[in-house]
Image: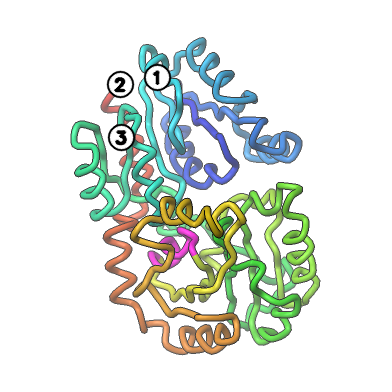
Amino acid sequence: MKIFFDVLNIYYFPQYLPVFEELNSRGHECRFIVYSKKNDKAKMTEMLENLKIDYVWVYDYNEAKDLYLNEQPNWIFFGNEFPHLDEIHKASKTVQMGHGIGPKPSYYLKSKTPMTVRFMEGDLRLKNIIKMFPNDKFEQVGFSKLDPIYNKTEKGIDLVKVGLDPNKQTLLYAPTFNPTSLGCFPQDWPKEFEDYNILIKVHALTLSRDRYKKEQKLIKQWASYPNVYVAGIDEFSLVPFLVSADVLISEASSTLFEFSALNKPVVICDFYDLKWSYKGIFKYRFEERFGKDSVIYNDLGAHAKSYNNLKEKVKEELSHPSNFEINRKTYTRDHVGPTDGKASIRIVNYIEENM
């Protein structure tokens, strides 16, 4: 079969790659269609070459549509909705795979334009989306992004190689894009946490867009501390960082679900900044985007009400990692799904059986 992966954003890669590797091992022809309008072409080209992936650049949706209609692959994987499905479906079947598993309503609403099939993760998510779109096709497979961890093929970050102390416990700070706690952390916070290694993995958009120079300067300051390693923009996958960390700090990232699925503790920041487009008279946009589930995962882990009590919460969770274990298992069943490392196998079996 000829199978294409639609790469609107760089952060789709960790979800796609385990599926690509399974397809590749079975002899299928795979190609990644990458958008230059959304990604840094020079940096992405180097990364794609290193991964030894067959790829084609397109500028936007229209160029992608023309390519798909001309090439007519058997299947196309999408990480989001796509505006030209009526035309695409005349020649190809389509897959929708979400790149994250957070509580945003957009997770569900991207299915309002149905694809041939959407691969789902946890029990509760599947139940909810079937209620919303009863006539569409959904298959529960799990979360392919985590397959390399469950299969133990992902070894994680080499702490010594990046200048950290393997004898220290390791914190992972992974703020999301909006809302973000990034600006609520002081310039010298790594010094206060000098007894720990600190891995920092921020959203790719924060590192790549010029409008966030202030945030980039702050991150650079943190990187100067000897107990800190900051992921570069070319380190697109969070998966190695999940493996190496003992505790996760975040505020609204779907990374909270992913880390909890490894049965490791999380500390949730209840303090964060909103972009101007979500403040004041635009507050309704924030409520629409995050809905009644909010960005606060109430019982998934410990909550730090402000930066001032963050260290206390981190210390408590590392000392008693079983505190929220039962809740983590519930969230994993509901949101992440099977944890046997076979999500990619189930996905590839399905598309082979439904040519």
Q: Please name the residue shown 49% across and 57% down the image.
A: 283
Compared to 176, does 354 lie above or below? above
Secondary structure found at label 3: helix
Check the picture and name the quadrant holding the C terminus.
top left
The numbered disc on residue 100 is: none
Q: Which residue is mark 1?
A: 74
- Residue 281 left/right relative to 140: right
Q: Are marks 3 and 2 in contact (CB under 8 Å)?
A: no
**Residue hosting label 3:** 349
Along the viewing direction, whichever of 158 and 282 lies nearer the viewer = 282
Residue 334: x and y in percent read 27, 59
Mark 3, Cα crowd under 10 Å, few <14 / some 14-19 / many 20+, is few
Q: Which residue is mark 2?
A: 355
Amino acid, disc 2:
Met
**Mark 1 or 3, which is nearer the eye?**
1
As for residue 253 lying within the magenta part, the answer is: yes
Single out the residue that lies furthest toward the top.
70
Q: Which x, y percent locates residue 258? A: 43, 61
User: Which of pointers 3 and 2 lies earlier in the amino acid sequence?
Assistant: 3
Q: Amino acid at mark 3?
A: Asn
Report helix, strand or loop for mark 1. loop
Q: Could you tell me if the residues under marks 2 and 1 are in contact, i.e. CB atoms within 8 Å?
A: yes
Between discs 2 and 1, the one toward the N terminus: 1
**Residue 101 in view:** no
Q: Amino acid at mark 1?
A: Asn
Q: Position of residue 197 (x, y in %)?
A: 65, 77
- The residue positioned 38% from the left and 35% from the top of the image is 96
